[in-house]
Image (tube, rainbow, N blue to C red):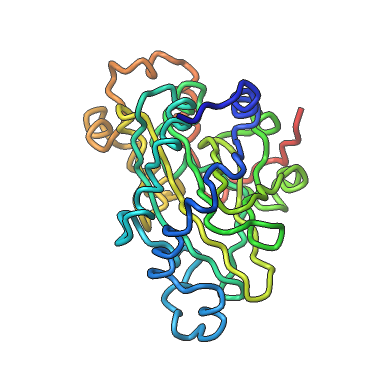
């Protein structure tokens, strides 16, 4: 059973993310990678006939294929016993529930993969990333290819630097919040590594710059079983849609519970911070101007 060290747990709590290099032995990935390339082309295959694979690059998310996969080993990797132990340790549960599992293939020159810095709570939970709610879920990448500086690494910012930021917007461009980009760290690691991060951690995808290169990985998300308010809808960025905020502001308590909000008896409603933060989140107005919040 995989056990995190005290330093790793401290790093998780301090920074909001953790990179476990070579978590899986490369030999353990051989069959899974073979099964992966039955679903998506290798970098060489894509570079040779990109027109054949246009359906994989219509958007930056088109290269996703959802669990379960035809290949048993690739599917089993998403719920590997050692991974479940680590995630369970961080969520403080025996067995976490996986609620998102997708293979994600990206190819150099196919489309722009660069993203702005954002926090994923907005598309994974109806609640807010307060101290209590941030413990309900986490997200992860399993690296199925080596990730160097030119291979589209994920860039992350320590939550120590962002605790003072408002909840909305949950996404900032470089012009709006330059210090995020100035303080980001690239999660560089070989295949077999696992990147874990909290839903309130600012992060972004960066561009693939290696000629004829590609990035392959599994995008996962885990939660506590009782956290019905944590979910993921493919193709719908729930938390970023103005219509969702309008619905929440006008719904009854029973209607909110029906779409997944915790019941009024849940302990979270006793937290005054949760109430004020939810009010802030769902009072969000698209296009509102925010100051450049520099770290205190």
**Quadrant of the rendering where the N terminus is positioned:** top left
Q: Find the residue positioned furthest to the front.
A: 27
Q: Is residue 266 above or below residue 245?
A: above
Q: Which sits in the foreground, 294 or 60?
A: 60
Rendering coords of residue 81 (x, y %): 39, 36
Rendering coords of residue 65 (x, y %): 38, 62
Can residue 170 be seen by looking at this rendering?
no
| In this picture, residue 244 sits left or right of residue 153 | left
Can residue 73 be seen by looking at this rendering?
yes
Rendering coords of residue 166 (x, y %): 60, 33
Total labels: the figure holds: 0
| In this picture, residue 224 sits left or right of residue 57 | left
**Quadrant of the rendering where the C terminus is positioned:** top right
Rendering coords of residue 104 (x, y %): 47, 60
- The residue drawn where x is 71% and y is 52% is 174
- The residue drawn where x is 39% and y is 64% is 35
| In this picture, residue 119 sits left or right of residue 263 | right
- The residue drawn where x is 65% and y is 47% is 187
């Amino acid at each position: 059973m995989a056990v995190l060290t005290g330093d790793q747990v401290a790093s998780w709590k301090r920074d909001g993310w953790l990179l476990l290099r070579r978590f899986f032995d490369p030999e353990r990935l051989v069959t899974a990678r073979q099964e992966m390339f039955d679903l998506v082309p290798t970098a060489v295959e894509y570079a040779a006939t990109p027109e054949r694979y246009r359906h994989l690059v219509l958007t930056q998310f088109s290269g996703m294929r959802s669990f379960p996969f035809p290949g048993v080993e690739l599917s089993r990797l998403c719920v590997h016993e050692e991974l479940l132990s680590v995630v369970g340790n961080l969520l403080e549960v025996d067995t976490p529930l996986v609620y998102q599992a997708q293979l994600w293939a990206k190819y150099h020159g196919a489309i722009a993969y660069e993203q702005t810095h954002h926090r994923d709570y907005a598309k994974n939970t109806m609640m807010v990333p307060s101290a209590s709610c941030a413990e309900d879920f986490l997200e992860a990448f399993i690296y199925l290819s080596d990730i160097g500086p030119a291979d589209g690494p994920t860039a992350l910012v320590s939550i120590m630097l962002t605790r003072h930021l408002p909840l909305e917007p949950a996404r900032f461009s470089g012009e709006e919040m330059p210090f995020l980009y100035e303080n980001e760290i690239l999660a560089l690691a070989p295949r077999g590594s696992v990147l874990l991060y909290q839903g309130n951690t600012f992060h972004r995808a960066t561009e693939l710059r290696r000629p004829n290169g590609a990035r392959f990985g599994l995008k996962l998300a885990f939660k506590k079983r009782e956290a019905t308010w944590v979910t993921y809808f493919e193709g719908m960025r729930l938390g970023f849609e103005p219509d969702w905020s309008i619905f929440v502001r006008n719904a009854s308590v029973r209607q909110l519970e029906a779409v997944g909000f915790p019941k009024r008896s849940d302990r979270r409603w006793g937290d005054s911070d949760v109430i004020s933060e939810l009010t802030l989140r769902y009072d969000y107005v698209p296009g509102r101007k925010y100051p450049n919040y520099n770290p205190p």
